[in-house]
Image: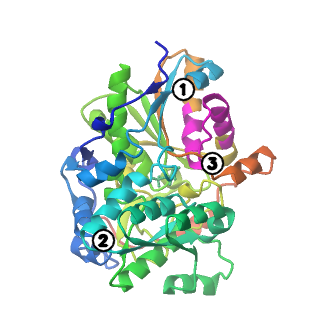
Amino acid sequence: MSQVKILLDEAEIPANWYNVVADMPKAPAPLLGGDGKPVNPESLAAIFPPAIIEQEISRERWIPIPEPVREIYRQWRPTPMFRARRLEAALGTPAKIYYKYEGGSPAGSHKPNTSVPQAYYNRQAGVRRIATETGAGQWGSALAMAGQMFGIEVRVYMVRVSYEQKPFRRSMMEAWGAEVIASPSPRTNSGRHILAQHPDSTGSLGIAISEAVEEAATRADTNYALGSVLNHVLLHQTVIGLEAKKQFEKAGDYPDVIIACCGGGSNFGGVAFPFFADKAAGKNVRLIAVEPESCPTLTRGHYAYDSGDTAGLTPLMLMYTLGRNFVPPSIHAGGLRYHGDSPLVSQLHHEGLVEAIAVPQRATFQAGLMFSRTEGIIPAPESNHAVRVAIDEALACKRSGEGKTIFFNLSGHGNFDMAAYDSFLSGKLEDSSYPAHAIEEALAELPKVKAPGR
Ligand SMILES: *Cc1c(COP(=O)(O)O)cnc(C)c1O
């Protein structure tokens, strides 16, 4: 009667990933080169293995998960879904709140769901070395772990502000055998260029991506891996939503609203896309992406072609963007500090099928503390954005008397983020105001190319 955890058997780990492209009203816009012409996907072969490139452009609805990947998924999947009964009681809401918990993976977040298949496909293609970037350290640690499992050497360019604020994330990556370098670094042209202009730059994900892509493109023995944004990454993360659908079936319930925090969009896409399939078939379900007020890509950005990195080394993608030169304020939710967003999430938001909300930092920590004190788990600062909006939805139900079913993804735990909680608990944490001027400047530098046929 008072079930708290809804669990699945290991045999119920999905056999296929779900590709949302098959159910989108319009095909995704092509990647463009700097000249405004579509990029030949094969030109990506310098940095990605063939299987990843194929997934990036696939329109198949179901893509099989390789058995060796499912084998490793068993280490922490299926992840539990919880009914947040203690939080519901504390709020006094008639709403039902469910959350899925991805913090039980070895790296403590959802990111190993994609680092493992990415390492697998690289190894399959004979690649023995990968360069990547990391913000708060969650992606870097997930790839370090996966690299170790497949005998791949990993070098991580870590955004300098996190390198200094989160030394234990660095230790984690090193424990899994990766090499970690603070970005911007003097090792790459992109890094040297930034340092010449801003010697004390705190870095950004956009800059760190430039450094890793540059290294992969210029070294024959090295590939590149990205922890979010791209179609294949969102594809891999759909194991979350696919499991959740089975768990709701077991619980005899179905969500009215699905909430996830959104940086590059892989966590949001991972949990929401399998439910989008139902929405496309006529079901009434709301999908809400939550972002920080200080890096409000979906809510305040332009829907335009822009580069995925600061130096402009990646192809141009049609997405919501704040401009590739925008360096977000140093908020604690490092995983949400990205100037752009997944082209798939962006397109669905542009078409009015996905909602977006921006929330201020302090309100997210207030929500995170309430969650910690009722449900026990201390959420990652990124996940607190989803917790905030889930609580707000539940409070709206309290006012209206509606018993809605609210579902959010708890993308990771905050056990490595206690400095951020310390700052909040001691009253030092501030809301950084909306950086209107910096965003305006960065948006003025958007590439002048048009979406073909749009
Ligand atoms: C990286 C990260 C996010 C942001 O994920 P995206 O997929 O880029 O939107 C959210 N939560 C946690 C715990 C993360 O590590």
Q: Earlier in the sequence, mark 3 or mark 2?
A: 2
Residue under numbered circle 3: 415
**How many residues crowd around disc 2 within 10 Å: few (fewer than 14), some, or many (20 or more)?**
many
Q: In the rendering, which numbered label is found on residue 52?
A: none
Question: Is there any visible trace of residue 361 in the rendered image?
Answer: yes
- The three-letter amino acid code for the residue at tag 1 is Ala
Residue at 36 percent across and 70 percent down: it is 316
Q: Nearer the viewer, residue 307 or 231?
A: 231
Q: Position of residue 41 (x, y in %)?
A: 23, 71
Q: Give the magenta-colored segment's residue range.
A: 365-390
Which residue position holds label 1? 84
Q: Is residue 206 above or below residue 408?
A: below
Q: Is residue 145 left or right of residue 57?
A: right
Q: Is residue 31 left or right of residue 383?
A: left
Q: CA distance from mark 3 to mark 2?
A: 33 Å
Image disc number at residue 48: 2
